[in-house]
Image: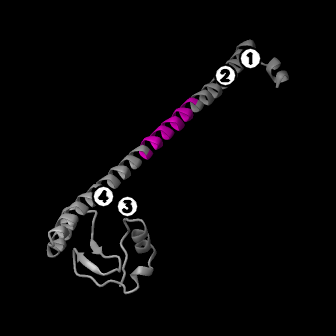
Amino acid sequence: MIKKLSDLSIGQSFFVISISIVAIMLLLSTGVTNQLVFSRTDRLIETTSKEINKQVIMNYENYLSSVIDISNTMQKYIVDLTKTNEIDKLSELLLATTNLERNIKHIALLDDKGMVIAASTPLTINPHIQDIDWFKQAINMPDIHHFSSLHTET
């Protein structure tokens, strides 16, 4: 390569060296630019992911808080209605709650034997409900709110 450069005129040698320097500078600037862009992109992705996670956690906490508030309110009304022996109004309360709260599809109030006291809609309960895990947990830990996903107990 150096032998070929010596065969060139000064103008041609200057041109080849200039092109080589420009090519090296372009490669270096491209490398530096890519590094800056990718590092900023990585930071942006990381920051965005963290913000999305925070939002998901906040929404979940708000949802849980809302469900617990509904449960506490219903518990107060249930206690009041049972004290005044107005058991027949419990189903109306449960139905009204499912109509007002779109996240709640069905509510049933069962005694510790698994018998239906009131429900938002008519239902048939599995005769072996006392053997189902969520029911056992609810009976064994009455001070804790128990929620379950949709399931069929018939």
Q: Quadrant of residue 97?
A: bottom left
Residue depth check, mark 2 versus mark 1: number of the one nearer the observer: 2
State the residue position of label 4: 67
* Circles 2 and 3 in contact, beta carbons < 8 Å: no
**Which residue is painted at 37% across and 50% down in the image?**
61
Instruction: Label 4: state its secondary structure.
Output: helix
Q: Position of residue 7 (x, y in %)?
A: 81, 19
Type of amino acid at the residue the image marks with label 2: Ile
What crowding class fits label 1: few (fewer than 14 Cα within 10 Å), some (14-19), or many (20 or more)?
some
What secondary structure predominates along the stretch shown in magenta? Answer: helix
Residue 147 appears at what percent x and percent y? 36, 65
Q: Secondary structure at mark 2?
A: helix
Tell me whether the residue at label 2 lies in contact with that at label 1, contact meaning CB atoms closer than 8 angstroms.
no
Q: In the drawing, what numbered circle is on residue 19?
A: 2
Residue furthest out toward the front: 83
At 48% across and 36% down in the image, what residue appears?
44
Circle nearer the N terminus (3, 1): 1
Does residue 41 show up magenta in the picture? Answer: yes
Kind of residue sitting beneath label 4:
Val
Q: Which residue is mark 1?
A: 13
User: Residue 31: where, in percent of width, then height?
Assistant: 62, 30
**Which portion, as a residue range, is magenta?**
36-53
Mark 2 or 4, nearer chain start: 2
Q: Secondary structure at mark 3?
A: loop
